[in-house]
DNA sequence: TAAAACCTTGGAGTGCACTCCAAGCAAGTA
DNA sequence: TACTTGCTTGGAGTGCACTCCAAGGTTTTA
């Protein structure tokens, strides 16, 4: 166990993650963050582990997962090992949704390509 | 010119497009629909052309384009031929954003895959 | 004709994901 | 020490994209 664990203030975490301080506090309030350490005076001191969690949460956000589902996932993590099946299920459902979403968007992209091509020529209608 | 153009009531359009009547009226109100024909008593009668437009708008929605940008696009169409460059630009910007979004999601999908794989084994941490 | 189903409007309400505020205490720098 | 910058909280506010409501007129079906 290292005695030199890095601790980050909220503004350091803001600039590292791109999340605002408001959002970071809000994440904690709604239960999307494991409890963050505090300094003797009560200020937040984030750890590298917190940063890792935030990075993972960022990936979940990117997938389009709702905040409610992310909170659900965080709860399952807090509840311990016996929730791994539920967690995997939640992640698998999310994965199915992401795959569907990507294929829809790829479809829409083709329409966009066609339309732009159309404009490059001259037969313009809409 | 055909004399047997099909005209759809709002509930027919609802079941064909999956958009609610509320949303269809709202689209018209905000200028996202070209003006829809009315029956002698004022009820909407949508044409096949309206359905085509709605299908295209649906594709734009799928790309994640904001309603404000879609309205902007609709305005450009109404303004006529001299706006084709602006329209193409708007579509090209949207295309760049969609491509970026798809690649972000593909990335996040890989993380999800890794995590699920992880759960399938036994080294479970978060 | 009578009932049921469908349509109209302007405006209010909803859910989501933040985003900001005020008042006050804490920490770092000259 | 004085000043500036940073941090705390609960709660209010924002922007987006719908979603619904009430009151009343229209159309279809039996």
Image: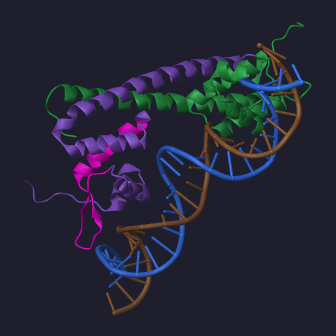
Chain colours: A green, B purple, C brown, D blue
Q: Quadrant of the C terminus of chain A?
A: top left
- Nearer-the-camera pick, B79 or C6: B79
Residue plotted at (32% across, 32% down) = B90
Residue B41 inside the magenta-drawn segment:
yes
Q: In which quarter of the image is the N terminus of chain A?
A: top right
Residue plotted at (26% across, 30% down) = B88
Residue D7: percent from left, percent from top: 78, 28
Residue B119 sits in quarter = top right
Q: In this view, does B103 lie to the left or right of B31?
A: right
Q: Is residue B16 above or below residue B123?
A: below
Q: In this view, does A77 lie above or below A47?
A: below
Q: Is residue B87 visible?
A: yes
- Nearer-the-camera pick, C28 or D29: C28
Q: In this view, does D10 lie above or below A75?
A: below
Q: In this view, does B96 lie to the left or right of B80?
A: right
Q: Report the number of discs.
A: 0
Q: Is residue B125 visible?
A: no
Residue plotted at (66% across, 18% down) = A16
Residue A115 sits in quarter = top left
Q: Give the range drawn in magenta.
A: B33-62
């Amino acid at each position: 166990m290292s005695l030199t664990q890095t601790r980050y203030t909220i503004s350091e975490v803001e600039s590292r993650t791109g999340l605002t301080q408001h959002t970071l506090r809000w994440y904690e309030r709604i239960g999307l963050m494991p409890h963050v350490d505090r300094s003797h005076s009560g200020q937040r001191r984030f750890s590298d582990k917190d940063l890792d969690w935030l990075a993972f949460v960022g990936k979940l956000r990117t997938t389009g997962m709702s905040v409610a589902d992310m909170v659900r996932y965080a709860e399952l993590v807090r509840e311990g090992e016996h929730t791994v099946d539920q967690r995997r299920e939640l992640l698998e459902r999310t994965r199915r949704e992401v795959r569907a979403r990507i294929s829809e968007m790829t479809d829409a992209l083709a329409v966009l390509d066609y339309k732009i091509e159309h404009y490059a020529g001259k037969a313009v209608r809409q």
